[in-house]
Image (cartoon, helix red, strand yellow):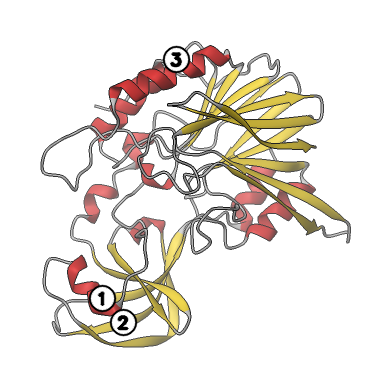
């Protein structure tokens, strides 16, 4: 059975305060033999208490609801979000909500240690680059299992092998059918527009790694981690309404200070920012990197004018994978007053509140 959401994506009367939560990573970890829920129930209770204490006018959820995309995990995520049902809520999916087996490893590895990443003892002896690299779109991405990042000629590449369990992951849209992947929430002249940054994702196969096992296929690939195609973006922006428009995207458009620069942001960020700016959007809220942060970049528009585009990210609400320099899970508190937007983050365990950024739209 699928999930049954109490959450309704409808208009609300915006006063001033929005809570952003991201990267919940709820549920069980398929890598462990025993089913142990990844998140301490006490931490979930603490989050509900602190969020309710803020009395927000609405809540934004910027993806990665689950730890591994299984139906029972989505049920746990649904139960948590429904515990906040008294607040209007807008939820977009993250990459983990669609897949996990092809996600990138957290740390680069050496070619010599690839044998530790697969069941068989595999030794990579030589890499042959393809003269004509080809793209594998989302529908077929699940055929490949990412087993490592390898640095070759000052550039990091991904090694993939054929994924025997890909059929399970081709059915993931079933689990997400109960909510739009690109919702809109609006009220009092403020519009939050959701973008699904996984719709246009893919991988580009660039080479083949020769190994000590002729029947074992290992591919060298370039992962596209967060993308919005020209056609998709332009079609989505046709629906923009008058007022203050803010984009809600799981992947950050630009790298954020303190965040890993290798991956996890848009490769065509400047283009996406320009299209958003020319449609009246100059601010986006994202997650994905498990680090609360802010950056802005001047973007040259088609008429030659330069404007600032602002990117703000939230830390992980529950994941134990908290990135330095932070040591606690957190959520963002967004205050909107006329054209002024201020963002604070609140830590779960300490309860402390710190300013992240202030932006004039």
Query: Do residues under tags 1 and 2 come within 8 Å of each other at their CB atoms?
Result: yes
Q: Earlier in the sequence, mark 2 or mark 3?
A: 3
Q: What residue lies at 79% left-to-right and 30% top-to-bottom?
A: 340
The image shows residue 187 at horizontal and vertical percentages of 69, 20
Q: CA distance from mark 1 to mark 2?
A: 6 Å
Judge from the rendering whether residue 123 lies leftward or rightward of residue 266; answer left or right.
left
The image shows residue 288 at horizontal and vertical percentages of 48, 46
Query: Which residue carries the number 2 mark?
Result: 208
Foreground of the two, 288 or 274: 288
The image shows residue 361 at horizontal and vertical percentages of 80, 37
Residue 328 visible in the picture: yes
On the rendered image, what quadrant is the N terminus found in? top left
Query: Which residue carries the number 3 mark?
Result: 49
The image shows residue 146 at horizontal and vertical percentages of 30, 63
What is the crowding at mark 1: few (fewer than 14 residues within 10 Å), some, or many (at least 20)? Answer: many
Name which quarter of the figure residue 344 lies in: top right
Picture layout, residue 157 above or below residue 40: below
Q: What residue lies at 29% left-to-right and 78% top-to-bottom?
A: 111
Query: Do residues under tags 2 and 3 come within 8 Å of each other at their CB atoms?
Result: no
Residue 242 visible in the picture: no
Element at badge 2?
strand
Q: Which mark is residue 218?
A: 1
What is the crowding at mark 3: few (fewer than 14 residues within 10 Å), some, or many (at least 20)? Answer: few
Element at badge 1?
strand
Q: What residue lies at 67% left-to-right and 13% top-to-bottom?
A: 13
Q: CA distance from mark 3 to mark 1?
A: 48 Å
Q: What residue lies at 40% left-to-right and 85% top-to-bottom?
A: 130
Element at badge 3?
helix
Q: Earlier in the sequence, mark 1 or mark 2?
A: 2
């Amino acid at each position: 059975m699928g999930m049954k959401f109490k959450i309704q994506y409808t208009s609300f009367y915006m006063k001033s305060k929005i809570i952003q939560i991201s990267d919940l990573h709820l549920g069980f970890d398929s890598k462990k033999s025993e089913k142990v829920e990844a998140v301490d129930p006490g931490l979930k209770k603490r989050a509900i208490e602190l969020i309710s204490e803020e009395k927000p006018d609405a809540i934004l959820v910027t993806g990665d609801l689950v730890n591994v995309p299984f139906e029972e995990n989505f049920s746990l995520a649904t139960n948590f979000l429904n515990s906040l049902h008294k607040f209007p809520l807008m939820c977009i999916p993250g990459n983990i909500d669609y897949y996990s087996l092809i996600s990138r490893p957290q740390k680069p590895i050496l070619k010599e240690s690839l044998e530790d990443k697969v069941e068989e003892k595999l030794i990579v002896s030589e890499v042959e680059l393809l003269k004509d690299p080809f793209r594998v779109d989302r529908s077929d991405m699940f055929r490949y299992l990412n087993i490592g990042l390898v640095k070759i000629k000052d550039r990091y590449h991904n090694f993939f092998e054929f994924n025997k369990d890909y059929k399970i992951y081709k059915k993931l849209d079933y689990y997400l059918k109960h909510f739009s992947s690109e919702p809109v929430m609006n009220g009092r002249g403020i519009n939050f527009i959701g973008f699904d940054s996984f719709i246009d994702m893919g991988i580009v196969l660039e080479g083949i790694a020769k190994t000590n096992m002729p029947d074992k296929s290992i591919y060298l690939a370039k992962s596209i981690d967060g993308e919005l195609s020209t056609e998709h973006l332009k079609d989505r922006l046709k629906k923009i309404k008058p007022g203050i428009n803010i984009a809600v995207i799981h992947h950050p458009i630009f790298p954020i200070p303190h965040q890993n620069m290798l991956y996890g942001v848009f490769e065509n960020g400047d283009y996406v920012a320009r299209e958003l700016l020319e449609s009246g959007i100059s601010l986006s809220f994202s997650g994905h990197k498990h680090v609360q942060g802010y950056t802005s970049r001047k973007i040259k528009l088609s008429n030659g004018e330069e404007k600032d585009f602002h990117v703000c990210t939230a830390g992980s609400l529950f994941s134990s994978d908290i990135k330095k320099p932070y040591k606690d899970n957190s959520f963002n508190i967004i205050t909107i007053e006329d054209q002024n937007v201020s963002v604070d983050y609140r830590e779960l365990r300490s309860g402390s509140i710190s300013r992240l950024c202030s932006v004039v739209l």
